[in-house]
Every structure is written in C-alpha cells, then in structure tokens.
C-alpha cells in the first residue's frame, strides 16, 4: 500500500511529496498525485535518481506527455525519449546551446499560454545545479485572483488576455511591435475556471501577456490596467522560491500557477530535464 503524503511548503500552496518511490508507483497513486497537483499547484519530489524512462513514466501519471517542438539551436544528443524530453541548460557545444532557455533571469509566466490549449503541467528534473541562484519562483494565481479588489475584477472579468511567445527576450515585456512579428500567440480568458478544481485563477503574466481584448479598446489602452494586474502578481504573498538541488523533480500546474527564474552564474553548469503535459482549452470563470 502506498505511503505517499504531502507536506505544505507555504501557507497558500506547494507541497513536498514524501514517501514516494518511483519503482513502486501504484494505480491508486495516480488520482492521489493528480488531486494533490490540483490542490497544491506545485509538487516537489526531492532526491530522486531517475533514468529518462522513469521520468517519462512518472510524467504519464499526470497526463499525456507532449511531443516537444525542438528549438533550432537544441543540439542535445538524441535518445529514445528525446521527443518527450527537453533540456533546460546553459551548456553549449561549439558556442551553441545544446538545450533551451540557457541564460539568466526569466520573468513570471505560464508555460504554454501562447497556444490554444495551454499545457496542463511542466516537469523539471535537476541533473546539475549552480551553487547560487537559478531558483524557480512560483505564484499562486488563484490567490492573486482572490486578492484583487472588486472594481478591478469587474473591469477584467469579461476580457481575454493576448499572449505571445518570444523567449528570445525572457526578461522583457513584449510590445505591440514585437507582438506583430510573432508567430505564436493565443488569447484566453483573463480569469479562467480551472478545468479540474473549477476554481477561478488569474491567467495573465508579465512575460507573455501583450494586451487585453474584448471591450473594444486596443492594446495600448489597456497598458495601465495590465500594469495594475502585473503589480498584483509581482507583489502577491502567495509565493515561494524553490532552491534546486540535484535529484529534485518539480511538477507545477500551469493553469493555477505562474513561475519565474532567478539569475544564476553564467560560469556554472545548470541542467534540468523537462517534460510537458498536454493541456486543453481554458474556459472563462465568468460567463
Ligand atoms: Fe517556464
């Protein structure tokens, strides 16, 4: 019988998974772990020693792993699992990054907000970490929504956020000019109803959200409104930072949380193995 239990990381959200053994995952653990992901938003599995195959099997507990689109610069060696296994690393070969998102700080964002069916979850497994920095900071967007004043909610409740993908600039807000040149973009309700928990969550973020639409105003009209919302996200107390150790596996719910990355020393190696869990279209909380 499984002995998995969960230890809260912060008052609002996040949990450390205790008593988990990757070789002993049982069918009954699947709903337990999925319910925990919905409830806590972020699950940390410390001190694992995973092959790619084991990591992929664990990813399947949470849904269907997505085949990744391989960045042009991604020169990682191929393995049988390479289509489902990305590398987030600053390691370079002949000066070219072998994975994705190699360097530095990254602003708060939801993975996959720039596609029509945003990812359900992201998994990162730490192979090598830096001595300082590189923490992943999470924010509970259910709590951010609950913290908004009523007048602000009434202004955004029927608007949709426009999200763009331009990870060449990972610590810079996109502009109308850059947005117009982007291939990947999507709109989603500004306040979503979480597909599993049915709870409301603010679904906007400072890195990818270009504008709000739906009330006839244009992107620049809504800049001040977005600034107010981004301040609420940045200043939320429903946040914690995960300091990575080798062997940590962290999975987060991309519908109810957003995340950022702290800067880290360029001269040290950082390497994490990533899986993406497929998502679905997100419905508005307010009809
Ligand atoms: Fe991300």
Image (cartoon, rainbow, N blue to C red):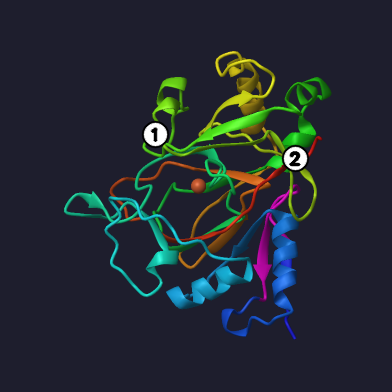
Q: Residues within 10 Å of mark 1 (few under 14, many from 20)?
A: few
Vertical arrangement, residue 113 with respect to residue 83, above or below: above
Mark identifier at residue 143 = 2
Q: Residues within 10 Å of mark 2 (few under 14, many from 20)?
A: many
Q: Secondary structure at mark 1?
A: loop
Q: Which residue is rendered at x = 41% and y = 60% of the image?
A: 86
**Sequence order check: which comes first, mark 2 or mark 1?**
2
Q: Classify residue 32 as left or right of residue 239.
A: right
Q: Classify residue 48 as left or right of residue 131.
A: right
Decide whether residue 137 is among the magenta residues: no
Query: Badges 2 and 1: C-beta atoms under 8 Å apart?
Result: no
Camera-side residue: 270 or 81? 81
**Quarter residue 264 falls in:** top left
**Quarter residue 138 falls in:** top right
Distance in Å between CA atoms under marks 2 and 1: 28 Å
Residue 276 in view here: yes
Residue 219: percent from the left, percent from the top? Answer: 56, 19
Residue 261: percent from the left, percent from the top? Answer: 48, 44
Q: Classify residue 22 as left or right of residue 87.
A: right
On whether ligand 1 comes within 8 Å of the CB at mark 1, the answer is: no
Residue identified by numbered label 1: 169
Q: Which residue is rendered at x = 74% and y = 70% of the image?
A: 31
Residue 208: percent from the left, percent from the top? Answer: 52, 34
Q: Which residue is rendered at x = 52% and y = 41% of the image?
A: 114
> In the rendered view of the protein, which quadrant contains the N terminus?
bottom right
Magenta region: which residues? 7-19
């Amino acid at each position: 019988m499984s002995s998995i239990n969960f230890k809260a990381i912060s008052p609002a959200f996040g949990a450390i998974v205790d008593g988990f053994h990757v070789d002993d995952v049982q069918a009954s653990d699947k709903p337990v772990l999925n319910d925990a992901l919905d409830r806590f938003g972020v699950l940390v599995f410390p001190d694992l020693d995973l092959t790619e195959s084991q990591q992929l099997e664990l990813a399947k507990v949470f849904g269907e792993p997505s085949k990744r689109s391989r960045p042009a610069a991604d020169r990682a060696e191929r393995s049988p699992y390479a289509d489902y296994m990305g590398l987030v690393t600053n390691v370079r070969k002949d000066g070219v990054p072998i994975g994705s998102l190699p360097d530095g700080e990254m602003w708060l964002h939801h993975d996959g907000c720039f596609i029509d069916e945003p990812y359900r979850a992201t998994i990162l497994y730490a192979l090598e970490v830096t001595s300082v920095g590189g923490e992943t900071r999470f924010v509970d967007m259910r709590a951010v929504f609950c913290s908004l004043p009523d007048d602000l909610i009434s202004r955004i409740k029927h608007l949709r956020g426009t999200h763009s993908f331009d990870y060449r600039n990972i610590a810079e807000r996109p502009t109308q000019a850059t947005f117009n040149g982007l291939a990947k973009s999507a709109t989603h309700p500004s306040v979503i109803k979480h597909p599993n928990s049915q709870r409301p969550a603010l679904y906007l973020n400072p890195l990818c959200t270009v504008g709000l639409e739906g009330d006839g105003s244009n992107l620049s009209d809504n800049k001040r409104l977005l600034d107010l919302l981004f301040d609420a996200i940045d200043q939320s107390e429903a946040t914690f930072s995960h300091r990575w150790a080798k062997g940590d596996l962290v999975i987060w719910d991309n519908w109810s949380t957003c995340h950022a990355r702290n800067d880290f020393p360029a001269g040290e190696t950082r390497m994490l193995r990533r899986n993406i869990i497929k998502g679905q279209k997100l419905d508005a909380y307010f009809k």
